[in-house]
Structures are given as C-alpha cells and as structure tokens.
Image (cartoon, rainbow, N blue to C red):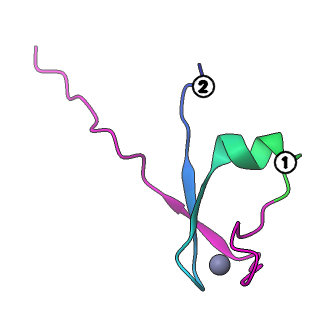
C-alpha cells in the first residue's frame, strides 16, 4: 500500500490522474485525456483528511 497516492490535475482540461497510475505508465507525466494531452499537471492534495494529534 503506497504511503501517499498523490493526485495530479491537468491545468488545461482539469482531468485528474493518480501518481500510482503515472508510475504504472513508466513515470511519464501526461494528461489522461486523449484529446488534451497536456503535459502540464499540478499536484492535488489527497482527499483524505489529515489527522491532527491532540495530546
Ligand atoms: Zn488535460
């Protein structure tokens, strides 16, 4: 289980792709939208909430 599955969002069309998917494709970062094919992706914060410790 990956410690952090970061998601990337295409700045052109807004399509999202997970880093694990990018890795499976050989680390080749590119928009998953076949009509867009942008190579400019930005990191999206993981959906899950961060737990804050309260001692
Ligand atoms: Zn795109």
- Residue depicted at 18% across the width and 21% down the height: 53
Magenta span of residues: 29-55
Does 12 appear in magenta?
A: no
Please tell me which of labels 2 and 1 falls first in the chain: 2
Label 2 sits on a secondary structure element that is loop
The answer to whether residue 4 is above or below residue 2 is: below
Q: Which residue is mark 1?
A: 25
- Residue depicted at 77% across the width and 79% down the height: 37
Seen as rendered, the residue at the extreme front is 34
Is 41 left, or right, of 50 in this rendering?
right
The answer to whether residue 13 is above or below residue 55 is: below
Quadrant in which the N terminus appears:
top right
x and y percentages locating residue 52 in the rendered image: 20, 29
In space, the residues marked 2 and 1 are separated at their CA atoms by 16 Å
Q: Dot 1 surroundings within 10 Å: few (below 14), some, or many (20 or more)? A: few
Seen as rendered, the residue at the extreme right is 26
Q: Which residue is mark 2?
A: 2
């Amino acid at each position: 289980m990956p410690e952090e599955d970061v998601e990337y969002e295409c700045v052109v069309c807004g399509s999202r792709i997970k880093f694990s998917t990018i890795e499976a494709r050989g680390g080749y970062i590119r928009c998953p939208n076949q009509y867009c094919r942008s190579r400019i992706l930005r990191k999206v914060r993981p959906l899950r909430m961060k737990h804050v410790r309260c001692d």
